[in-house]
Image (spheres, rainbow, N blue to C red):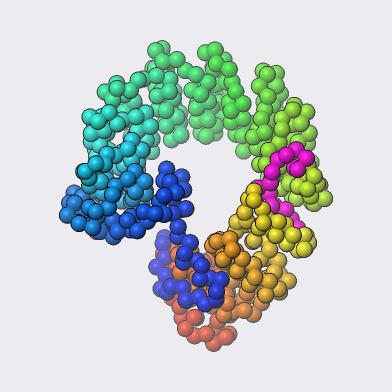
Amino acid sequence: MASVYFPFRSKVPGHFWRAFSSLCSPSSLVGTGVSNGEACIGSQIDTIISRIREGSSDDEVSKSLGHDEVCNAIPMSQNLVNVVLHRFKDDWKSALGFFRWAGSRLGYEHAPESYDMMVDILGKLKQFDKMRALMEEMHQDNQVRLSTVAKAMRRLAGAREWEDAVRVFDDLGNFQLEKNTESMNLLLDTLCKERKVEKARAVFLELKSHISPNTHTFNIFIHGWCKANRVDEAEWTIQEMKGHGCHPCVISYSTIIQSYCRQSNFAKVYELLDDMQAQGCVPNVVTYTTIMCTLTQVERFEEALQIPERMRSLGCKPDTLFYNALIHTLGRAGKLREAVHVFEVEMPKTGVPPNTSTYNSMIAMYCHRSQEEKALNLLREIENSTLCKPDIQTYYPVLKSCLKAGKIDNLSEFLDDMVNKHHLSLDFSAYTLLIHGLCRANKCEWAYNLFEEMVGKDITPRHKTCALLLGEVKQKNMHDAAERIEVLMKQMKTSE
């Protein structure tokens, strides 16, 4: 469905919804290389962004910032530059104009990471001429790194410019970078991830006479063949790597095992497990977790529950993710007592800590079996835990139980804790659950307030949700609400 213009914004009363507007925080940029100091420069970033007119060319952006006294009084830093570039990751003109202006500021020089971000933005938006020109500028200042080349190759390959991606590798010497196993692997990985395994093979056959492959080289091909659903070639690659004097590792076998799991070909899975052991390559906890999860998905529960013993017999120690999968499997198999034993006895005994997903599985199991008191005890435990904190999925089964039991006062209390105590925001599933449940509980006004909050956050409701609420508000003679819902439904229909 295309994006929908929502004809109204949220007018939701109630103390536990007020906190939603304050949740747009710098945490949304986690993983961009930005430090915690971002919060301190937030107003400076907003000032710069407010001065950039949408639709301006990169030259216009650079010039307008250069003539802005307020912006020129803002001290430049790598953090500030990286945050602004991240904000403009889908607007290359604004990003490049800002980047040029920032680079011209007295006493500031772009860090290699900022150059790489700009290269990536230009490549992502298919501005390849400008990307190449920027890389040439970087070359003049000795700023081109292997990470820069990797980003350029990945974006070219993603745009199906295969030959140009290979040409970037061919030009490594011009950037004073070496053509070696590491750089070759980057190119092969780029091509394989774009499902051009045959092209990667042709490149490899041309290069292998003067660049030695390593285990990672062949693992790249194994992953590429498996991604292309050509598992036979992946298995053949195991033999090829042995011929080059490279030893297959856990990753080599586990990638193929995962592919056979997707095909539900468990005979081949067990055959490979035996082969691994014969080769002295012991499967790891990730391998066994993958197998157990897949067996559970196809409801082969008894077989899945044999995996932990097989794993222990080889001295492979479980981790939190394995225990989470085991608890989920036991729950699906209807073995609540065994799941509780794993959670309360086995995990503490082995020193493996639970995480949020562990608690979520246990809470969901208790709620599903109408053992709400035990679920609430675990909810209080995770709320006070120093190891992990609840997320929206923690509360979902609890909210569902409240609605099912008609405990509306408890529902309000849990929502208040979610928003004000744990700073969580409702998602599509939670809004849908609450609106439907409150309509069934004859709490139409509250359901409509949540509906307004939902669309005010640009979360598009299902047609079924709109139709249900529309019928309820009409029965309550809420004419304005009915009209707004009908307008939204028409908008949704025309956007399909």
Residue placed most toward the observer, 203 or 352: 352
Q: Which residues are magenta?
A: 347-367
Residue at image location 51% in from the left, 67% down from the top: 19
Can residue 109 be seen by looking at this rendering?
Answer: yes
Residue 419 placement (x, y as % from top left):
56, 65
Outermost residue toward the right? 337
* The quadrant where residue 426 appears: bottom right
Residue placed most toward the observer, 73 or 237: 73
Q: Is residue 406 left or right of residue 127?
A: right
Residue at image location 61% in from the left, 26% down from the top: 250
Whether 352 is among the magenta residues is: yes
Residue placed most toward the observer, 224 or 99: 99
Total of numbered circles in the picture?
0
Report the magenta stretch's main SS. Answer: helix
Residue at image location 58% in from the left, 17% down from the top: 247
- The relative height of residue 243 versus residue 48 in the rendered view (above or below) is above
Q: Is residue 371 left or right of residue 438?
A: right
Q: Quadrant of the C terminus?
A: bottom left
Q: Is residue 146 left or right of residue 11?
A: left
Whether 189 is among the magenta residues is: no
- The relative height of residue 268 versus residue 429 in the rendered view (above or below) is above
Residue 166 placement (x, y as % from top left):
34, 27
Can residue 61 be seen by looking at this rendering?
Answer: no
Residue 126 placement (x, y as % from top left):
30, 42
Residue at image location 39% in from the left, 12% down from the top: 210
* The quadrant where residue 117 appears: top left
Residue 61 placement (x, y as % from top left):
22, 52
Q: Quadrant of the N terminus?
A: bottom left
* The quadrant where residue 52 appears: bottom left
